[in-house]
Image (cartoon, rainbow, N blue to C red):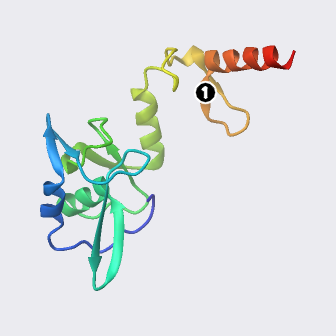
Amino acid sequence: MRGRAMTPLPADVQDRILRNVSPHGSCWQWQGARRSTGYGVIGWRINGRAYTQQAHRVAFAAWCGPIPEGAQLHHTCRNKWCVNPFHMEAVSRQAHSVRHAAERTHCKSGRHPWTRENQIHNGQCGALICRLCRNERMKEYSRVRR
């Protein structure tokens, strides 16, 4: 989805989105189809051609206008099922990464606090990983190899 131009939207797109949400606090919880990533997906046809897009991107475009080229949508509510366009902000990829890192409190396993002291760079791809999880994996690897 990143950097891809938005396809033409059907005239009734707002109604179609609203029919597929249920209120959850101030979030519009998507009740339609979802991808394996958890993000909602919506499809439609225009002049016989089928289109499919992520529901939150379609909602943002329908209520707020086009997503700037190269921008990603950040869910300010931190709920990937939410399609409320007023809970989204178009940001650069770098800003999006910084925001997600700032919101993170625990490593991906959920077992260790996500502190600066507990982060190391993965030598393979340069991503930040949990030092304690890596140490546990290395101990297990060494134990199995003996």
Where residue 120 sits: x, y (%)? 64, 24
Q: In which quadrant will I find the N terminus? A: bottom left
Q: Which residue lies under the disc numbered 1?
A: 129
Q: Amino acid at mark 1?
A: Ile
The quadrant where residue 79 appears: top left
Asked if residue 6 can be seen in this view, the reply is no
- Residue 66 at what x, y percent from top left? 28, 64
Residue 65 versus residue 77: which sits nearer the camera?
77
Q: What residue appears at the point 29 percent right and 53 percent down from the top-left corner?
A: 56
Please indicate whether residue 101 sits to the left or right of residue 6 in the image. right
Residue 117 horizontal side relative to residue 138, left or right: left
Would residue 13 appear left or right of 55 to someone viewing this image? left
Q: Is residue 96 left or right of residue 122?
A: left
Q: Quadrant of the C terminus?
A: top right
Residue at 69% in and 20% down: 137
Element at label 1: strand
Question: Label 1: how many residues lie within 10 Å, few (<14), some (14-19) or many (20+)?
Answer: some
Name the residue nearer the viewer: 39 or 120.
39
Please tell me whether residue 125 is drawn above or below residue 15 in the rendered image. Answer: above
Residue drawn at point x = 31 percent, y = 42 percent: 75
